[in-house]
Amino acid sequence: MSRGSAYLLVISFLLLIALGFVMLLSTAPYSQEGQMDAMTGVRRQGVWLLLGLITAGILSVTDYHRLQKWAGPIFWISVALLALCFVPGIGIKVGGASRWIGLRIPGLGMLQGQPSELGKIATVIALAAWSSRFRDRRKDFLRGFVYPLGMVAIPVALIAGEVDLGTASLIFLACTSMLFIGGTRAIYVIGLILMGSALLATAIHKIPNRTARITAFLQLNDPEVAKLKADIADMNRQQTQAMIAIGSGGLTGQGLGESRQKLYYLPLPHTDSVFAIIGEEGGLVATLGVIVLFLGGGLAGINIALHAPDRFGKLLGFGLMALVLGQAAINIGVTTGCLPNKGMPLPFISYGGSNLFSCLTALGIVLNIYMQAREAAGESVPLLNREKLTPAV
């Protein structure tokens, strides 16, 4: 396998991270975190970046088969952290959603994290380990479908219970694709997709706020309805302002730092709506550049997964890339009005430390899969003039 895949993977995602900090400097003064000190958010994101890079570096030189060995504990720890979101005093409820847990650190204030970010990776690891262990039973109804589905359902149900249907759907789709490429019978996968769609529709119907979002989205491009119904106009405000931002950017943009929509017109310009600010300040050139970087890095990661030396590595690498690319597609789809409004950060770019940390964690694991693949092919893979630090399990 060519070294080009690893270079493209790393360079693409590092460029996205750099762009994220540039956009954070542009939007931070207009964010809630930047009301008193515009650099507060930058410092917090910098801490998460440092932690993420250290973790990615360690994982890149640690045999990924160790994750297979510890898949069970990693999975159940993530489930326990997800459950903490519902514990008073630890879980943080914002806007009716209990998605965060917090820890107060002197000098940095309340350091918050979303356990669902760990939950995504832990679920992919657990499913890849299960599918590898029962490779010969992958077409069985119980061991090849029902049992792994029940395992995935635990974190998905907890995350959905936080009222985070987007992340729950992302994990569900990534794991469904893993089951499909892992050899589960196509009829089971089709049934799973239909069942998941029905459950999602039921959940949306049972949660009034989500039902209203879908209703508003269906009338997103009808200005007459917005004039007559203030509640629909309010629910569509973020997407409407995001599309105005992208449209006003034109081909080359208004210029770095010159966004008007971030001046309290567009909600969350540094997190969920950062792609719109990129479009306004950098124009079509910048937005297409972001999409190309995601596609380049994602396809490089998938190519690495396909060349993994074993089934676990193939499924693990594919699942991690499915999470990153799926999240990017959802964020961009929402920002451009192609999908219903859903708060989900843009990987590597949006402000949000736990998401950046989880993305870098995934990057580190995929890099080790690359190293293992090269060594399995009999090729030397030096890292800082040394071989990998840990032996194969």
Image (cartoon, rainbow, N blue to C red):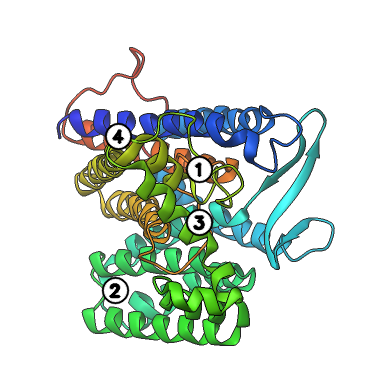
Residue at image position (30%, 66%) is 177
The reply to whether dot 1 and dot 3 touch (C-beta < 8 Å) is no
Residue matched to label 4: 252
Q: Name the side, left or right, on which 137 lies relative to 16.
A: left
The one nearer the camera, 384 or 129, is 384
> Which numbered disc, 4 or 2, marks the residue closer to the eye?
4
Residue at image position (61%, 70%) is 163
Q: Give the CA distance from mark 3 to mark 2.
A: 36 Å
> Which numbered disc, 4 or 2, marks the residue that appears first in the sequence?
2
Residue matched to label 2: 137
Q: Name the side, left or right, on which 49 lies relative to 34.
A: left
Q: Name the side, left or right, on which 93 lies relative to 281.
A: right
Residue at image position (50%, 44%) is 358
Instruction: Indicate the amino acid at tag 2.
Output: Arg
Disc tally is 4
Task: Say which quadrant the C terminus sits in.
Answer: top left
Q: Give the CA distance from mark 2 to mark 1.
A: 41 Å
Q: Toward which corner of the image does residue 183 lie, by quadrant? A: bottom left
The reply to whether dot 3 and dot 2 touch (C-beta < 8 Å) is no
Q: How crowded is the residue under tag 1: few (<14 C-alpha within 10 Å), some, or many (20+)?
A: many
Instruction: Point out residue 268 in the picture as x, y percentages from the top left corner.
Output: 58, 49
Question: Is 121 placed above or below 34 here?
Answer: below
Q: Toward which corner of the image does residue 354 lie, by quadrant? A: top right
Instruction: Indicate the amino acid at tag 1.
Output: Ser
> Which numbered disc, 3 or 2, marks the residue that appears first in the sequence?
2
Residue matched to label 1: 350
Instruction: Indicate the amino acid at tag 3.
Output: Met
